[in-house]
Amino acid sequence: MAPRLKLFLPLFIFVVLAGFLYRGLSLDPMALPSALIDKPLPAFTLTALADGRELSREDVIGEPALFNVWATWCISCRAEHPYLQQLADRGVPIYGINYKDEDEAARRWLRELGDPYRANIVDREGTLGVDLGVYGAPETYLVDAAGVIRYRHVGVVDDRVWRDTLEPIWREVQAMGEQP
Amino acid sequence: MKARLLALGALMLLSIHAGAVIETYEFSTPALEARYQLLSEELRCPKCQNQNIADSNAPISQDLRRLLHQQLEAGASDEEILEFMVARYGEFVRYRPAFNAATAVLWLAPLILLLAGVAGLLLILRGRRDGAAALTEDDQAQLATLLQTPEKDA
């Protein structure tokens, strides 16, 4: 290496390091990629919150939908709830997965705060949660008409998350469903 | 006063282990229990990252421990159990992830850095030796005269 170029070595190292650190500022170290993207929604046989009838995978797939993991013990779910209601009012089908919760508390929550869900799957033991790779609530899965998981969002879904991340995939999934 | 300080110091040295995990599982054989210990220390809690599921009291770790116990009692092999966990939570869930395209950088980076360091060191050392031997004949002659002629100021 020419001696002149050698002088720029510290600057070069600084730029590389600064580049990595700058990238690090906007990364969420807790975020994990889901292992289930582009995999089918796992099979399950669980009860419905409303009437206790049996629900399985076949009952909830067939059109694109959101699957929202929630619980009454989850504070962020309460913050998320009004926005889910808005999405439901706009015609987005949402299924709830009531995760490790008590049925009575969950029914009361829906009576008091409104019910944006098509149906609620009672996952009291967290078995469906484990099959989905859930590690906390709220989490929201975007599932296409074929029952394939297309996206998973960990944390609260709000207007920004919907516009920036979920809606583009939602449109794509819907367009796919319309073509035979 | 001194005795009090000593007592206080001694108290500070005491640490009470409060991180104990509550539930215990019954195993049909001690071998299964040993594998349970090993696997639960090797599996990482997805919620409270940087803890393994043996140490963590997060609900998800309780679930994973319960599943681990069930699967061990059902006769699953270590590979089957790890596969089950990785299929749901990704390679992240293992403290020793399998070697594949996604984890290659993780496994190889230390080796590559070490090799780069050794290569850099060799380059520097060689540069020094070459530098010492790099005097031309003219330089040598000049050096010889400089060494022979005493300095005028001296």
Image (cartoon, rainbow, N blue to C red):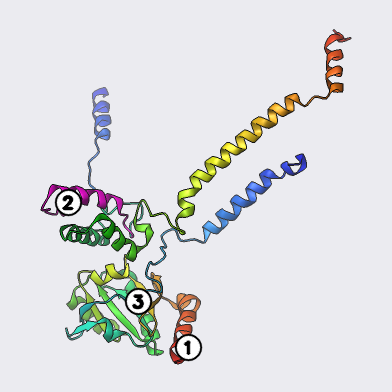
- Residue drawn at (77%, 27%), measured in percent from left and top? B134
Classify A17 as above or below B123.
below
Q: CA distance from mark 3 to mark 1?
A: 19 Å
In the image, residue B87 above or below residue B111: below
Same subunit, tags 2 and 3 = no
- Name the kind of residue labelled 2 in the image: Leu
Disc 1: which chain? A
Instruction: Give the image quarter of residue B146.
Output: top right
- Give the residue pinned by disc 3: A40
Residue A140: x and y in percent read 36, 75
Residue occupying the point 15% across, 58% down: B73
Q: Is residue B55 visible?
A: no
Q: Amino acid at mark 1?
A: Ala
User: Which residue in the protein does label 2 denote?
Assistant: B32
Q: Which mark is residue A175?
A: 1
Look at the numbered disc 3 and give the secondary structure of its residue: loop
Give how far across and how far down residue A46 sits, in percent: 20, 78
